[in-house]
Image (cartoon, helix red, strand yellow):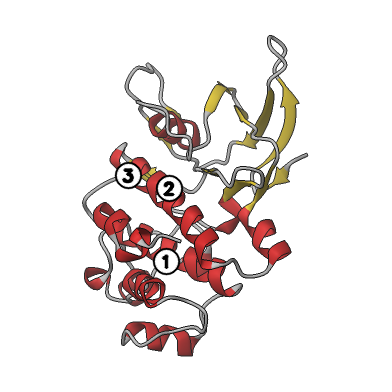
Amino acid sequence: MLGEGGCGCVYEGTRCKDGLKVAVKCSKKMPAMPYIRVPGHPKRLPIEIGLMLMANEGPSVSQIIKLLDWEDDTEHYVMVMECPVPCVDLFSFVEHRGSLDEGMARNIMRQVTDAAKTCCDRGVFHRDIKLENILVNQDTMEVKLIDFGCGAIMKKSAFKVFHGTRPYCPPEFNLKGRYHAKPTTVWTLGFLLYEMLCGECPTSYDRHMITVNLWTRPGLSKECCRMICDCLQPDPQKRLSLDTMHLHDWFKVTE
């Protein structure tokens, strides 16, 4: 078994026709589980399958896990996905190494940002970008975004129900009970970056210093500290734009 969640388990497997190593996720259908329609498929599909099909639609993006096959049964649905080897989730990677150096964090962050933006461009709001949902190949440092189980279809209007991991919840939901897809994605990416560099979640003092754009950390460049402040502004309108995130000065630093 590779992993276990609230509604299902992920197993390691081998595809019979060619010996390819795969990950097989079997999920139990819950009573109120949402379904969506995906172009090219006559039936409505469990939302996790549908979102993965949408995220994989178009030119291949290596930073998004590939859905190879799926089956929708009465009580369960099964997804067969690529299983990169050797890989660990980013949580285990950071836990083992401690806080990451800035160059390594930049490499990972650039890839995750590309994956998140591609998902949004293809109509998918992942909604649960976190350390545990990113795989890292320790040989190549390539990453893959996984687990679309908390996701939703993109929309311009606000979401009013939070799905995801509570520490990553954007402050606008706690204040107003609503949040939008792209600003929330930027918030979770900033939170992820902070965890990679600092090895912990931001404290209330850190959040205050970030809000007033005075946050610094010994050993981090001014561009990096600026990046964190730009992503973790509590006012979503003051946050960095997801569409231009890749143009930030921090990504232009060469080592």
Dot placed on the residue nearer the N-terminal end, 2 or 3? 3
Dot placed on the residue nearer the N-terminal end, 2 or 1? 2
The numbered dot on residue 120 is: 3
Secondary structure beneath dot 3 equals helix
Q: Residue at x 39, y 72 (%)?
A: 228
Give the residue at mark 2.
Answer: 126
Q: Residue at x 48, y 35 (%)?
A: 62
37 horizontally vs 157: left or right: right
Count neighbours of disc 1 (C-alpha within 10 A) and say few if under 14, some if 14 to 19, many if 20 or more: many
Where 134 falls versus 254 (above or below)?
above
- As measured in the structure, the alpha-carbon distance from the residue carrying label 3 to the one carrying label 1 is 17 Å
Q: Residue 212: horizontal and vertical position, in percent?
A: 31, 87
Give the residue at mark 1.
Answer: 190
- Tell which of 89 and 4 is nearer to you: 89
Secondary structure beneath dot 1 equals helix
- As measured in the structure, the alpha-carbon distance from the residue carrying label 2 to the one carrying label 1 is 15 Å
Mark toward the viewer: 3 or 1: 1
Residue placed farthest to the top in the image? Answer: 17
Residue placed farthest to the front in the image? Answer: 255
Q: Residue 49: horizontal and vertical position, in percent?
A: 49, 31
Amino acid carrying mark 3 in the image: Cys
Amino acid carrying mark 2 in the image: His
- Tell which of 10 and 42 is nearer to you: 10
- Tell which of 188 and 114 is nearer to you: 114
Secondary structure beneath dot 2 equals loop
